[in-house]
Image: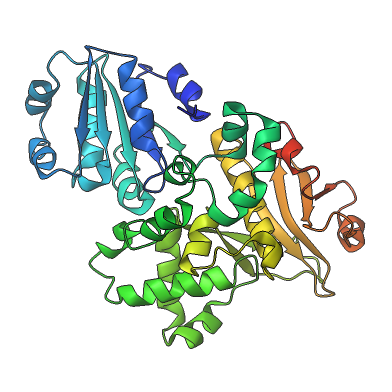
């Protein structure tokens, strides 16, 4: 079993008086992780799958006496896919506030369903984590850095969902199933999604435009929708952990582009599956896009795994100067120019002139693993 980085942090916070919430996309390994934790507390824990109707009925009563009856002598309660409970936040709050020495761990595959229900009732009562598909650091720790670096082309094509990693030789079939509505079905259960086919077309359009700047107006024209609906659907896909956005960094310099954004996929394999394109790396004309999406998503996973609180952006000026990815923390800017061709020199002079105190690095296949293994960079 491949160890997850957040496991050690969760272990340190067990029975600390707060609920532990684990968010992430479907099939990212949340159930495997919570069952592993449960196995460390044999005899005092209980697992509930909230996808099941019987579980939802069991937790329908919103009172302490019913919850005490359900929990019994258990000290650890696992609520898997807790977004399926109508009253998830209140149930967890009642346990935290009224049943001492009981640890609740809840997972959710949809931030907009789970977090919106939890934020108000669980303010000050929860620790929140994100569990994404395997990160480079997790995979290299399981095998070796050399082994994982040698698998780079596979990661660029097939990504790193657990089911993909655990089924070598069947990657494209697994991804085809994952990239169907199953992965983002939480989006479709919302009452105000009247055009699920528009969501699927939008995902395909975003897959084609990955790492490029995205215009909601242009997407709306392309998909025969309206910009407000497109933006709302993109937000829902973000909250379902399928995509995420970077905004352009600006300090109101006159020559900087403002209010621009790029959209990336959390996993290269899902992006390629949406396009039904698993051609080898050396036959692709989109290798630059694949490389940039892979690295930006890996940086994002690294930050989430190590709970690194930083702002992330890209940067572009009116004169076409560009930095692919940058992180801001404690007034320090770490900027990264991402190049697949190790011989291609980046053009970063205009950025350095504007931000002379920034640390600027070029990331290419020869050095990327140094940045993805260590959170101190």
Find residue 278 and report its horizontal and vertical position in percent. 55, 63
Residue at 72% x, 39% y is 369
The image quadrant of residue 96 is top left
The image quadrant of residue 359 is top right
Residue at 35% x, 43% y is 119
Name above or below for residue 189 compared with residue 357.
below
Which of the image's four quarters has the C terminus?
A: top right
Query: Is any part of residue 335 visible from this angle?
Result: yes
Count of marks overlaid on the render: 0
Find residue 67 and report its horizontal and vertical position in percent. 12, 27
Image position of 72 (left or right of 288):
left
Name above or below for residue 53 compared with residue 181.
above
Instruction: State how the image is colored.
Output: rainbow
Find residue 274 and report its horizontal and vertical position in percent. 46, 67
Image position of 95 (left or right of 226):
left
Q: For this rendering, which residue is in front, 345 or 175?
A: 175
Residue at 28% x, 46% y is 117
Residue at 41% x, 57% y is 173
Residue placed furthest toward the front:
169
Which of the image's four quarters has the N terminus?
A: top left
Query: Is any part of residue 375 visible from this angle?
Result: no
Name above or below for residue 259 compared with residue 32.
below
């Amino acid at each position: 079993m491949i160890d997850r980085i957040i496991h050690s942090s969760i272990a340190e916070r067990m029975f600390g008086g707060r609920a532990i919430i684990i968010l992430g996309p479907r099939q990212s390994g949340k159930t495997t992780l919570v069952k592993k934790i449960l196995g460390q507390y044999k005899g005092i824990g209980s697992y509930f799958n909230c996808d099941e109707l019987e579980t939802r009925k069991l937790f329908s009563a919103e009172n302490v006496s019913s919850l005490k009856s359900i929990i019994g002598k258990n000290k650890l309660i696992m609520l898997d896919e807790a977004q399926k409970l109508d009253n998830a936040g209140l149930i967890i709050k009642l346990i935290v506030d009224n049943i001492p020495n009981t640890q609740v761990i809840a997972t959710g595959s949809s931030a907009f369903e789970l977090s919106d229900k939890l934020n108000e009732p669980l303010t000050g009562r929860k620790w929140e984590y994100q569990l994404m598909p395997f990160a480079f650091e997790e995979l290299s720790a399981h095998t070796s850095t050399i082994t994982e670096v040698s698998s780079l082309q596979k990661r660029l094509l097939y990504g790193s969902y657990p089911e993909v990693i655990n089924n070598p030789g069947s990657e494209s079939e697994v991804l085809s199933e994952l990239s169907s509505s199953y992965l983002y079905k939480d989006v479709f259960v919302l009452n105000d999604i009247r055009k699920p086919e528009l969501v699927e077309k939008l995902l395909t359009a975003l897959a084609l435009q990955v790492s490029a700047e995205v215009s909601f107006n242009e997407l709306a024209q392309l998909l025969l929708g309206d910009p407000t609906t497109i933006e709302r659907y993109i937000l829902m896909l973000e909250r379902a952990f399928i995509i995420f956005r970077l905004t352009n960094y600006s300090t109101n310099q006159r020559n900087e582009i403002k209010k621009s954004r790029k959209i990336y996929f959390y996993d290269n394999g899902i992006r390629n599956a949406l396009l039904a394109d698993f051609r080898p790396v050396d036959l692709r004309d989109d290798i630059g896009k694949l490389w940039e999406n892979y690295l930006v998503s890996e940086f994002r996973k690294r930050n989430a795994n190590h709970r690194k609180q930083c702002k992330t952006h890209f940067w572009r000026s009116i004169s076409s100067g560009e930095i692919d990815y940058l992180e801001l923390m404690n007034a320090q800017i770490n900027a990264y120019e991402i190049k697949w061709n190790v011989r291609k020199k980046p053009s970063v002079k205009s950025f350095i002139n504007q931000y002379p105190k920034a640390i600027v690095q070029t990331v290419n296949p020869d050095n990327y693993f140094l940045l993805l293994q260590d959170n101190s960079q």
